[in-house]
Image: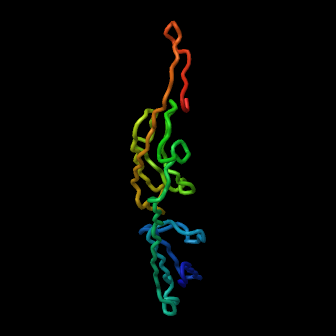
Amino acid sequence: AESGNKIEVSGSDGVEVKYYKDGVLLANPITTTAGLDAGNYLITVSCASHELKTNINAVSRSFTVTPAEIDFSNVSWVLNGAAAANDRVNYNGQIYNATLNLGTLADKFDVYYTNGSSKNTGSVTTTATIVPKNANYTAKDANLSYTWAIDSVAATVAWNEDGTVASITGDDL
């Protein structure tokens, strides 16, 4: 019987129930209550004995579980794990990494970055390609780009008489 999102199939002696996913016969019945993987399913019920065939008609039911589409158009970018004011950070000699903050979606998607790290001053455009880890998900707006900048800072250098640096002072140094 089919009822909403639940399908129940039962049989007794002489009744054969087969389960298929994407055209492949499954070794075990479909029993999950947590949901099924995306794909096309077919359940067939048939009668093996002639006596039962007169009282029961063979039936089959098919259904499709479609992948969940996740929209990434509003996902936030972070620099070294923190939001950057106006997409800008000050130079500090360290490498900055631009990444997407996927939150709970990180276990369902991989992200591949191009130009995702820099330690030099100037503008950087990072691109991200989002790829589902399995066929249960698709990514809407799966190719994103982010332009950010590392700003230079003013520094004052004091020199020793022998030409070595005595001190460097300035903002965020």
Closer to the camera in the image, 46 or 133: 133
Q: What colour scheme governs how the chains and residues are painted in the rendered image of this protein?
A: rainbow
Residue 32 higher or lower than 111, as above or below: below
- The number of discs equals 0
Q: Residue at x 51, y 47 (%)?
A: 85
Nearer the observer, 100 or 107: 100
Instruction: Tell me the quarter of the image containing the C terminus.
Output: top right
Q: Nearer the viewer, residue 135 or 75?
A: 75
Query: Nearest the camera: 21 or 161?
Result: 161
- Quadrant where the N terminus lies? bottom right
The location of residue 65, given as percent across then percent down, is 47, 71
Task: Tell me if 146 is positioned left or right of 14 in this view.
Answer: left
Residue 127 pos. (x, y %):
40, 47
- Image spot of residue 131 (x, y percent): 44, 54
Examine the rendered structure and indicate whether residue 149 appears above or below residue 4.
above
**Image quarter for residue 149?**
top left
Residue 80 placed where, x, y %? 53, 42
* Residue that extends furthest to the bottom in the rendered view of this protein: 55
Seen at 52% across and 77% down, the residue is: 17
Image: 64 above or below 59: above
Whether 157 is drawn above or below 129: the answer is above
Residue drawn at (52%, 7%), measured in percent from left and top?
161
